[in-house]
Amino acid sequence: MISFNRRTKVYVSREFTDMRASYDSLFEKTKSVLNQDPYSGHLFLFINKHRTSIKCLFYDGTGLVIIAKRLEKGLFSKINPFLRGELVLTAAEFALYFEGANFDKRFIESPAEIKKSFQKNIEFPMSQELQD
């Protein structure tokens, strides 16, 4: 059982991962690709190329734990490889992502694009007094 506290972060790897990877290769990828300490108690999320499977590496204080999931239908949300900095999920976001929720608004679209499309669709009705 994974217990999250409010300090637990979920780091997402932008590089695709071969799902044959096990403890040692995910441990190494955590250090080299994510530049994080695998023993930190945070969870590290790895996605395969087809976005049908994910693996998570987690240190629970006694040893490393791997959690794997393959979706029967659909795909996990696409991660934008051009995002700058670390890609970190909250525990709530991870729970939704793990269930296959659509995170395209979170990962793909930039705030500027969302703001532009939002402003185009807003029309404020004017009262008769202001139109005269």
Image: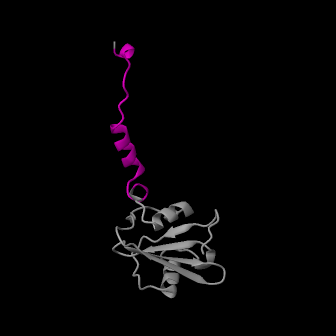
- Where is residue 93? Give x, y as percent: 51, 61
Q: Residue at 38%, 16% (x, y): give it.
A: 130
Colouring scheme applied when the structure was drawn: one colour
Can residue 88 be seen here? The reply is no
Is the N terminus in the top left, top right, bottom left or bottom right quadrant? bottom right
Question: Does 106 lie within the magenta span?
Answer: yes
* Residue 132 location, quadrant: top left
Exactly how many numbered labels are in the figure? Answer: 0
- Where is residue 71? Give x, y as percent: 39, 72
Can residue 89 be seen here? The reply is yes
Taking 82 as reference, is 85 left or right?
right
Question: Does 100 lie within the magenta span?
Answer: no
- Where is residue 103? Give x, y as percent: 42, 59
Residue ranking furthest to the right: 61
Taking 4 as reference, is 113 left or right?
left
* Residue 91 location, quadrant: bottom right
Instruction: State the residue in front, 115 or 19.
Output: 19
Q: Main secondary structure of the magenta part?
A: helix
Residue ranking furthest to the front: 72
Magenta span of residues: 105-131
Q: Residue at 37%, 73% (x, y): give it.
A: 72
Relative height, residue 46 to residue 88 (above, below): below
- Where is residue 116? Give x, y as percent: 36, 43
Q: Residue at 43%, 56% (x, y): give it.
A: 106
